[in-house]
Amino acid sequence: MTELERKRDRAPVPAGWDYAPAPESRDVVSIEERYGLFIGGEFVEPRSGEHFTTISPAYEEPLAEIAHAGPEDVDHAVTAARDAYENGWSKLLPSERAKYLYRIARILQERAREFAVLESLNGGKPIKESRDVDLPLAAAHFFYYAGWADKLEYAFPHRRPRPIGVAGQIIPWNFPLLMLSWKIAPALAAGNTVVLKPAETTPLTALLFCDVVRQAELPPGVVNIVTGDGRTGAELVKHPGVDKIAFTGSTEVGKAIQRELAGTGKKLTLELGGKAANIVFDDCALDQTVEGIVNGIYFNQGHVCCAGSRLFVQESIAEPLIAKLKRRMTTLRVGDPLDKNTDVGAINSQMQLDKIRELVASGEEEGAEIYQPPCKLPEKGYYFVPTVFTNVAQSYRIAQEEIFGPVLSVLTFRTPEEAVEKANNTPYGLSAGVWTEKGSRILWMAQQLKAGVIWANTFNRFDPTSPFGGYKESGFGREGGLHGLEPYLEFEGGEAFGG
Ligand code: NAI
Ligand code: MG
């Protein structure tokens, strides 16, 4: 890099680049004042008699009253799912099952704008992400698994795959509709029925999905949605009528679920936290890498289990790379999720904002150097400025714990061996990134890194055909691809992929 280039990268971004507001219209969504539980193909009042308010984190504005499902409600939903399983769905011609899934996929595409706006309203993510990432991928998962529904015998030859029954599915708030799709599409394709519990802060797109289920004329009880908090989730986990639990969320709750299910014979898959290493070698394409780093940690406000939250930079390029990164951060637009120019939207909840603040304070206390670009945050709503920490030691909390926010910790290394050792020094193992022009080094690194997904010269790239999941405390089981069907099937002579 020449001195001139260095100077250019340090120069501030010209001031006065104001963007006119480009708000996406909210008119396309209509939100009910109050929602029941979706059981047996219709909305019913919760037997618990309890409701809670869901808000928009960007405006701190109440959006709707949501039912809180109690034990009786969960039992009601599991019974409806069991009935639907026994009386039709599991015996339906697989090619007929496929038709329903294709129909759901197409309706999601048709109603994509409505879903995208609602997702951003309820969860705080930028509209450009819900529109260009969450919705297309959600539809793609239904299309993909629709294709397997009548080909299971070919997917798992000589194994005689059959459905397992009722699946209980618990999802988090970072990708509400997408996580719903990851869970529901393979479960139905395999011939199961489901009871799904959305996260308490983001129930609205799951409730709108009930409308899609009706529009697709899916038989009643095949998909049931029970809203509520962790207590509702816990009821679903321990219900004896559930044959399989699929959970995505915190490692803490994942461990509790595993303890609860030990010895019950229920199947379980867990997709938990992460502290991914994004590893940058001195021969990388610098500008492209900076884009990848930004995408890796500031996408979806960093509320991403596979976020590239630990950046490992080869010492010889640390200085120019960090200069470029900081400069790029000054161009990130933080604010209203419904503005089409917004890059970083609202933090999902007050609770999550508190957690981010606490960990950032610990980073400063432990001695890391903080950088935040100048940035004016909206007065109302939960926001956090994109942050990078340099001078980070491996022992610091910000290098160890999942922050789940727009906060990057930068560490350095000299040799590939050192990079591997540091990258693997974590209880997690969900994802990793490698940036280098050398193909052989990419392959070598991919063999050494203990992570379920490894991206080379890209990050956060998803595809329904590709399995996703973790090692160690990031969980077990895979979602996506053929591997993602396996947990929803039983086989003659044991599991298809083992474990
Ligand atoms: P959480 O694990 O408590 O919540 C995830 C889902 O599990 C929600 O639907 C929740 O209602 C449900 N749940 C909570 N307690 C349960 C229980 N005992 N039994 C069954 N279901 C239960 O995660 P939370 O509290 O929202 O976030 C805490 C931290 O977890 C985040 O800061 C982040 O670090 C991590 N996280 C990781 C996610 C991932 O994608 N791997 C997603 C969400 C959070
Ligand atoms: Mg929790």
Image (cartoon, rainbow, N blue to C red):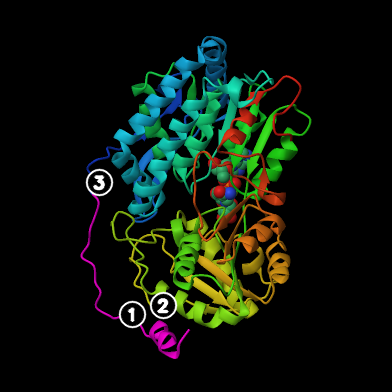
**Does label 1 point to a residue whose CB lies under 8 Å from ligand 1?**
no
Name the residue located 31 percent from the left edge and 45 percent from the top edge. Answer: 117
Q: Which residues are magenta?
A: 1-24
Residue wearing tag 3: 26
Question: Counting other residues with Cα less than 10 Å from the Cα at mark 1, is it few (<14), some (14-19), or many (20 or more)?
Answer: some
Displayed quadrant of residue 318 = bottom right
Query: How would you rate the neighbour count of disc 2 (Cα within 10 Å): few for under 14, some for 14-19, many for 20 or more?
Result: some
How many numbered marks have been drawn onto this rendered protein structure? 3
What residue does disc 1 label? Answer: 13
Residue 132 or 95: which is nearer the viewer? 95
The residues tagged by marks 2 and 3 sit, at their Cα atoms, a distance apart of: 33 Å
Residue 225 visible in rendering: no
Residue 391: where, in percent of width, then height? 61, 80
Name the front one of labels 2 and 3: 2
Horizontal and vertical percent for residue 174?
48, 49
* Residue type, label 3: Arg
Residue reaching furthest to the bottom? 3
Report helix, strand or loop for mark 1: loop
**Residue 327, disc:** 2
Q: Are marks 1 and 2 in contact (CB under 8 Å)?
A: yes
Q: Residues within 10 Å of mark 3 (few under 14, many from 20)?
A: few
Q: Residue at x 49, y 43 (%)?
A: 463
